Image (cartoon, grey):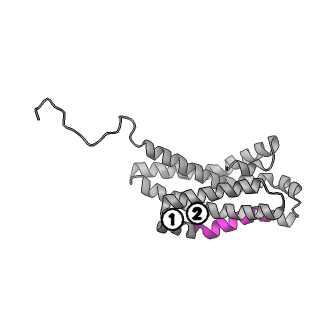
Amino acid sequence: MTSSQPIPTTDTSAPGKRGGGKGIALLVIASCQLMVVLDVTIVNIALPHIQNALHFSTTGLAWVVSAYTLTFGGLLLLGGRTGDIVGRRRVFMCGVLLFAIASLLGGLSQNSGQLLAARAIQGVGGAIASPTALALITTTFTEGLERNRAFGVFAAVSAGGGAIGLLAGGVLVEWLNWRWVLFVNV
C-alpha cells in the first residue's frame, strides 16, 4: 500500500443514514403502543352507539370495556415473559397481529357476544404486544441518550393516546359509524 491510497473501513453506511433502521423500529413500536392505549378511550366514546346497535343492557355495556382491560391487565406479565423466552420480535409481531384481527372481528360483530369475545382477544393481543414493545426499546437502542429519547417517545405516545382516543372516537362515531373505532386498529 502506498500512502496515497485510502485505508479501507468496515463502515459501509451512507452519511446521514446511520440509525435509520432504529427510527423505523421506534415508529413501529410507538404505533403499537398508541394502538393499545388508544383503544380504551376510543371505544368509550362509541358505547352509546354500540348499546343501540347490538342491544346491550346498561350493565352488559360495561363489559365492552372490561373484557379488554381485564384480559390486558391480567396477561401483561405473561406476555412479557413469553417475549423473553420465545423471542421479543416474534412475540411482538404475533401480539400486534392478534390485536388487529380481533379489532376486525369486533368491528364486524353482529351481536353482543361476538363483540365481547373480540374485545377479550384484543386484550390478549395488547398484553402480548405492549410489554414486548417496551423490551424491544431496551434491546434495540443503546444505553444513554438514544435509549432515553426512545423511552421519551414511548411515554409521550402512551400519555397522548388517551386524549387522541377521545378526539378520534368522537370524529369516527360522528362522521362514520361506531364500528370504525375498532376498524381504525386494522
Q: Is residue 75 magenta?
A: yes
Quadrant location, the N terminus: top left
Residue that carries the numbered disc 2 in the rendered image? 128
Residue, x 51% and y 65% (percent of image)? 83
Residue that carries the numbered disc 1 in the rendered image? 83
C-beta proximity under 8 Å, tags 1 and 2: yes
Per the image, label 2 sits on a secondary structure element best described as helix
Q: Where, by quadrant of the figure, is residue 138 drawn? A: bottom left
Per the image, label 1 sits on a secondary structure element best described as helix
Residue, x 40% and y 49% (percent of image)? 145
Q: Is residue 55 magenta?
A: no
Count residues near mark 1 (Cα–Cα under 10 Å), then give few for <14, some for 14-19, many for 20+: many
* Residue numbers of the magenta segment: 62-76
Task: Return the x and y of residue 33 as percentages of the image width and height.
Answer: 59, 53
Task: Return the x and y of residue 65 as percentages of the image width and height.
Answer: 75, 62
Q: Where, by quadrant of the figure, is residue 112 drawn? A: bottom right
Q: Please name the predominant secondary structure of the magenta segment in the image.
A: helix
The three-letter amino acid code for the residue at tag 2 is Ile
